[in-house]
């Protein structure tokens, strides 16, 4: 079912109609009853023909087209709709051969999309593809960020961050701590565990002069 949806999106992307892509993706999703990321508007920076070809090849799993696009100087880390890179598309589709090619060309395995998700976050049930990414250093967004682990209530991964020596009160780019993120997202159990490890909100730290 996923391949049918990918083909639908690919057909629309080829004619460059992002709005129609949203509509078709939504309709296909409803019919297939299978989750897929929203397809936001295209990046403001125009893509080269080689970049477009690589994205399409990754989206459809066309290994030969992917090779040719790279020969034509496509950027293996180009960001298309939703800031998805070719690695995001290939991983989501479970196209292991395309993933291998991108790895060989030094593609970023941990690039973040518009929602802060990495390719590994989108691997779904494609275990072989997920294992391949992990073998070369691929991580989920939760594994990369103690704040995201707290926000999503992933206690196991949160504890791994602490075991690795990360600061339980580290502030993100907008000044929020892991506890702030857990509380905001109603992760009560995670918030309790964070407090047990000395975690505080940004306001509490400010009151203490920190």
Image (cartoon, rainbow, N blue to C red):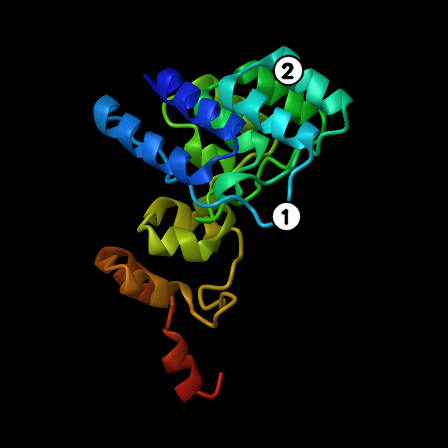
**Residue placed farthest to the top in the image?**
64
What number of labels is visible?
2
Q: Are marks 1 and 2 in contact (CB under 8 Å)?
A: no
Q: Residue at x 45, y 68 (%)?
A: 169
Q: Could you tell me if residue 126 is visible in this image?
A: no
- Give the answer, above or below, for where 23 lies relative to 169: above
Q: Percent from the top left, x then y, of residue 28?
A: 29, 26
Q: Percent from the top left, x then y, of residue 61?
A: 53, 16
The numbered disc on residue 117 is none
Q: Could you tell me if residue 41 is visible in this image?
A: yes
**Mark 2 nearby-residue class (10 Å; few <14, some 14–19, many ≥20):** some
- Dot 2 corresponds to which residue? 65
Q: Nearer the viewer, mark 1 or mark 2?
A: 1
Q: Residue at x 55, y 27 (%)?
A: 133
- Give the answer, above or below, for where 177 lies relative to 121: below
Disc 1 to disc 2, C-alpha distance:
23 Å
Q: Identify the image quadrant of the N terminus.
A: top left
- Give the answer, above or below, for where 46 lies relative to 74: below
Q: Percent from the top left, x then y, of residue 204?
A: 37, 81
Question: SS class of the residue under badge 1?
Answer: loop
Q: Percent from the top left, x then y, of residue 102?
A: 65, 25
Ranked by sequence position, the earlier of labels 1 and 2 is 1
Question: SS class of the residue under badge 2?
Answer: helix
| Depth check, front residue: 31 or 109 | 31
- Dot 1 corresponds to which residue? 45
**Mark 1 nearby-residue class (10 Å; few <14, some 14–19, many ≥20):** few
Q: In the picture provided, is 198 more to the left or to the right than 76?
A: left
Q: Residue at x 23, y 29 (%)?
A: 30
Q: In the picture provided, is 72 more to the left or to the right than 134?
A: right
């Amino acid at each position: 079912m996923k391949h049918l949806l990918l083909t639908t999106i690919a057909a629309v992307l080829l004619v460059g109609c992002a709005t129609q892509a949203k509509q078709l993706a939504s309709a296909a999703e409803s019919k297939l009853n299978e989750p897929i990321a929203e397809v936001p508007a295209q990046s403001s920076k125009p893509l080269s023909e080689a970049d477009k070809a690589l994205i399409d090849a990754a989206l459809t799993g066309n290994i030969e087209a992917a090779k040719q696009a790279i020969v034509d100087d496509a950027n293996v880390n180009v960001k298309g709709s939703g800031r998805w890179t070719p690695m995001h598309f290939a991983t989501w589709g479970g196209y292991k051969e395309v993933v291998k090619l991108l790895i060989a060309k030094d593609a970023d395995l941990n690039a973040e999309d518009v929602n802060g998700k990495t390719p590994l976050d989108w691997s779904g049930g494609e275990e072989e593809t997920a294992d391949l990414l992990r073998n070369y250093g691929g991580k989920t967004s939760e594994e990369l960020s103690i704040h995201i682990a707290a926000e999503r209530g992933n206690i196991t991964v949160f504890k791994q961050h602490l075991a690795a020596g990360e600061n339980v009160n580290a502030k993100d780019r907008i000044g929020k701590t892991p506890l702030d993120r857990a509380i905001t997202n109603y992760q009560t159990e995670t918030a309790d565990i964070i407090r047990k490890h000395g975690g505080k909100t940004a306001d509490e730290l400010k009151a203490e002069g920190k």
